[in-house]
Amino acid sequence: GDSVTQMEGPVTLSEEAFLTINCTYTATGYPSLFWYVQYPGEGLQLLLKATKADDKGSNKGFEATYRKETTSFHLEKGSVQVSDSAVYFCALNSNSGYALNFGKGTSLLVTP
Amino acid sequence: DAGITQSPRYKITETGRQVTLMCHQTWSHSYMFWYRQDLGHGLRLIYYSAAADITDKGEVPDGYVVSRSKTENFPLTLESATRSQTSVYFCASSLLRGNNEQFFGPGTRLTVL
C-alpha cells in the first residue's frame, strides 16, 4: 500500500540556517504530495503541495519538488526563523483515494 | 468564519465509558475525516465520510463508531473507552477527494484512565 517515510527528528537549527527535511514515498500511479505544518497546540495546516512530477510547491519561503524518479518530496528553506519551530508532516494522496497517508512527522526547533 | 471546530478540546474519562467527540464544519465540505495522532505513528485515519449518511473505515477503526446525519457534523464515538485510545484526535474536511487540501480542526486531547 501507499506509504510515506520522512526523516526522524528532532531537528535543531540556529536561526538563518538552511533546512532540509527528507521525504520519500511508495505509491502506485501518480499521487499528489503535501507538506503540512503543526504549530504547538494547533491542528495541521497545509504548507504546500504538488500534484504531478516536477511540480514545485512553495509557500512562506519553503519549497519542495515532486521527484518521481527518486520518489521524493524533500522540504527546504534557505533561512529558517524561530517562528518556523513546529512539526512538519509529509503526506500523499493517491488521487483515487479519499484520505491522506502521513509520515510520522519531523519536529523542528529553531534557536535564536 | 468559524471553519472547522472540535469539542471538547480536552477530555479525561475512565476505561469502559462511552465518549463522543464532536466535529462541526461551516464550509459544507462533502468529505470529512477522523484521524488520531500518536507519538511514533504520525496521523492515522480512523473513519471518513464522503457525504451525509456515507461513511467508511480507515486504517484503525476498531472501537470507534461514526455517524453523519448532517453534512456539517461528524461525531466520533468511543463505545467503551480503553487506555490504548488515549490520543489526540483530529477532524478534517475537504471539498473534493484526491489532491484537494484538507482543513484540520484544533484537535481533542483524550485521556483514558
Image: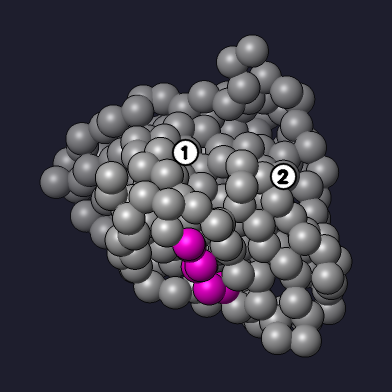
Left or right position of A24 against A87:
right
- Judge by depth and name the residue closer to the eye, B1 or A74: A74
Q: Which residue is mark 2?
A: B101
- Give, as a single range, the part of the protein colored magenta: A18-23
Residue B53, horizontal then vertical, whole percent:
73, 38
Identity, as a three-letter code, of the amino acid under mark 1: Gly
- Magenta region, mostly helix, strand or loop? strand
Q: Which residue is mark 1?
A: A43
Q: Is any part of residue B89 visible from this angle?
A: no
Residue A67, horizontal then vertical, whole percent:
75, 77
Left or right position of B81 against B56:
left
Where residue B25 sits, quadrant-wise, is top right
Q: Using the image, name the chain to which the residue with label 2 belongs.
A: B
Farthest front residue?
A16
- Judge by depth and name the residue closer to the eye, B19 or A78: A78
Farthest left residue?
B113
- Judge by depth and name the residue closer to the eye, A14 or B101: A14
Where residue A54 sits, quadrant-wise, is bottom right
The C terminus of chain A, quarter of image: top left
Identity, as a three-letter code, of the amino acid under mark 2: Glu
